[in-house]
Amino acid sequence: MVQGHIKIYQILESKNRKEIQKLISVESKDKKEVILSDKGIDLVKYGAYLYYVNSSVFNEQEFSVFFCNDKYFQKIQSITQELIYFFNGLTDRFKLKIMPIKYNSEIIENNQKYDKVILFSGGLDSLTQTVRSIENREKILLCYTNHNKKVTRNVRNLVSELEKMFKIRLDLVEINYFGIKCKQEKEQGIINSRAVAYALNGIAIADSVNAKEVIIPENGAIATLPKFDISIEPTRTVSPYLMEKIANIAFDLTGIKLSDSLAKETKADVVKTLKDRKKLIHLSYSCTHPNRRDKLKKNNLRDIGHYHCGTCLACFIRMTALLAVGIDENKALYKQMPMDFQTMSEISKYKYKNDFYTLISLLDYCYDILERTKINELNHFIRSTIELNQNSHFSEFEDLDILSLQKSFALDILIGINEYYRKNNLPMQNFVLGKSIKSLLAKFKVRLNNRMKELE
Ligand SMILES: [Zn+2]
């Protein structure tokens, strides 16, 4: 068993409140321990269980997990099985035995200091949500599930900058049991259930501080991005299908509302909010491969810390969204610009060449989604995820037209790539990605122009 798994296993097995609190390690920005409510501990355990099962490489396991609200978790056994099926495709390998436990409840302050808990990852979506909430004078608590030291540093720097910029005090809570990655995650990238575990952590914190709402800030286009390539999992995504289930659990158990106020936007729509806040953008971090990056050596960028790999899907969507709304990011913040690759043989020598297969599939997807007028014209993989999410009742996804949001997303990508070549005066036909989108730009010219006006 790998180290990350051992810690999660200990959390699941433990019957002692003090020990669990220590294993989960919940701290405020100024290193004060945050005491979890009983329901909070249950929810963290439930998320840890789903994550463990999803990332486990072992067969046939029976778990005994101790819950304070054992009757409730007994009641939602079939939902748990549905979630596991969604993650793993198999259910009968894992048996969950729910056991009752009573802790010596800690006293939790009853004052309502916060309206909302915002899941804060240090990326552009959660940053934008935070800026909007600050501007609306909402009393917010940021919640970050620590999964990587380098990212944690970025998150803390970003929070300090927000405090400086808006001249306010911002509270941040860090949950630290995710510190060590499990083996499977290293091999396959990020695992689906992580977003679910993070959401459950946020609800646990909200219940412990008496906040009534938890916001998962994920733009709707990414949350509903279908599996457009066999090799990709819709990563970090807050799939509305999954979130509806988590929202129901949160509400039934705690009365807390789970929502995503960025549901109707693409990444480009979202980052428009940050147009005049360049410093924040530079401190934000989107790359899904923090270990690919090195320290920035250039003096003027040193305060930012680390840079983006540039070629992973998350980096690519970030850079094209910013380009699409005319936000100028320093090229030096990226290790590689995927638009700069000139030939396929150059790509084949690149260490992370698989990234390019994903990016080229993404461009195919953009073409496909712009060509079709109905969901049933799309290929099976794409259609099935869109349909699954289209029927979701989660938050603002309820009446969202996913197909038209995906079309806007596709246009944003094309606008962003085009903008890169235009700005740098580079002839598109000299580059692999440039070549791939040249005919698309001509074909969808009118729609691209309309979308550009929308984004202005
Ligand atoms: Zn990256």
Image: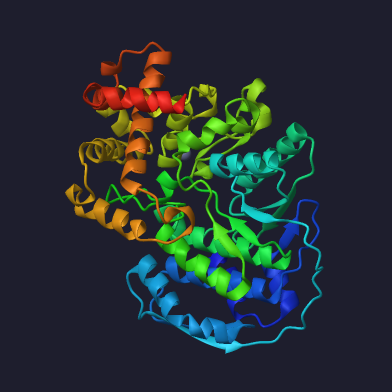
Q: Position of residue 186 (x, y in %)?
A: 46, 54
Q: Nearer the viewer, residue 88 or 353?
A: 88
Q: Position of residue 109 (x, y in %)?
A: 82, 68
Note whether 164 is above or below 28 in the view shown. Answer: above
Q: Is residue 16 visible?
A: yes
Side (left or right) of 346 relative to 424: left
Q: Nearer the viewer, residue 277 or 132?
A: 132
Q: Is residue 63 visible?
A: no
Side (left or right) of 245 relative to 355: right
Q: Position of residue 386 (x, y in %)?
A: 31, 53
Q: Residue at x 45, y 57 (%)?
A: 185
Q: Position of residue 316 (x, y in %)?
A: 42, 35
Note whether 153 is above or below 178 in the view shown. Answer: above
Q: Nearer the viewer, residue 393 or 274?
A: 393
What count of labels does the image hold? Answer: 0
| Residue 279 placement: quadrant | top right
Q: Residue at x 35, y 21 (%)?
A: 418
